[in-house]
Image: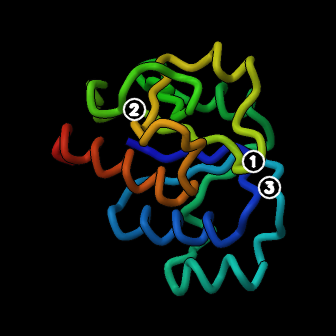
């Protein structure tokens, strides 16, 4: 399993996700451009001493990311635009958990190129969760199911 962030906007969220990925030993990849500079103080504060940019793989574009993935990896897009519940989805060890940018999600093209689209169930009338919280929920369920 790996986490991929599509053009993240908020450094504090990215720093928190870096820290979580490090603690669980889950690879993290980032599709650029980001909405902040990676020496941003807020990024460093949220990621603390867990930020090792040599361990994060950066992609210049979504196409660059697609060209780097192996055929046995599924792109599992977390989106509020899906009807498939995260807890009904069957994760596999080689899944790529893809998260869109905080301000706009992902493009229709990325929706179409994803192998699965799932949502975190929420109380009706609420739009979305914070990116770092969503990532933690999805990773936790993926780990629970696969045992990795």
Q: How is the image coloured?
A: rainbow
Residue 61 horizontal side relative to residue 50, left or right:
right
Tell me the quarter of the picture where residue 22 sits: bottom left
The residue beneath circle 2 is: 95
Q: How many marks?
A: 3
Within 10 Å of disc 2 (Cα), the crowding (few <14, some 14-19, many 20+) is some
Q: Earlier in the sequence, mark 3 or mark 2?
A: 3
Q: Which mark is residue 7?
A: 1
Of 121 and 102, the residue lying toward us: 121
- The correct choice, above or below, for 53 with respect to 31 in the image is below
Tags 3 and 1 touching, CB below 8 Å:
yes
Q: Measure how far apart labels 1 and 2 are at the Cα level.
A: 19 Å
Task: Where is residue 142? Give x, y as percent.
Answer: 29, 41
Q: In this view of the protein, which residue sits in the foreground, 76 or 130?
A: 130
- Check disc 3 and report the residue beneath it: 34
The numbered mark, 3 or 1, whose residue comes first in the sequence reads 1
């Amino acid at each position: 399993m790996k986490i991929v962030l599509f053009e993240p906007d908020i450094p504090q969220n990215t720093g928190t996700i870096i820290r979580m990925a490090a603690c669980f030993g889950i690879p993290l990849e980032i599709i650029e451009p980001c909405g902040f500079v990676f020496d941003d103080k807020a990024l460093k504060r949220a990621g603390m001493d867990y930020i090792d940019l040599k361990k994060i793989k950066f992609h210049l574009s979504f196409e660059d990311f697609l060209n780097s993935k192996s055929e046995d990896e599924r792109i599992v897009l977390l989106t509020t635009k899906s009807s498939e519940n995260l807890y009904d989805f069957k994760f596999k060890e080689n899944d790529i958990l893809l998260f869109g940018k905080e301000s706009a999600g992902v493009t229709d093209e990325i929706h179409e190129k994803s192998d699965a689209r799932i949502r975190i169930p929420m109380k009706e009338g609420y739009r979305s969760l914070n990116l770092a919280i969503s990532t933690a929920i999805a990773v936790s369920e993926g780990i629970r199911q696969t045992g990795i």
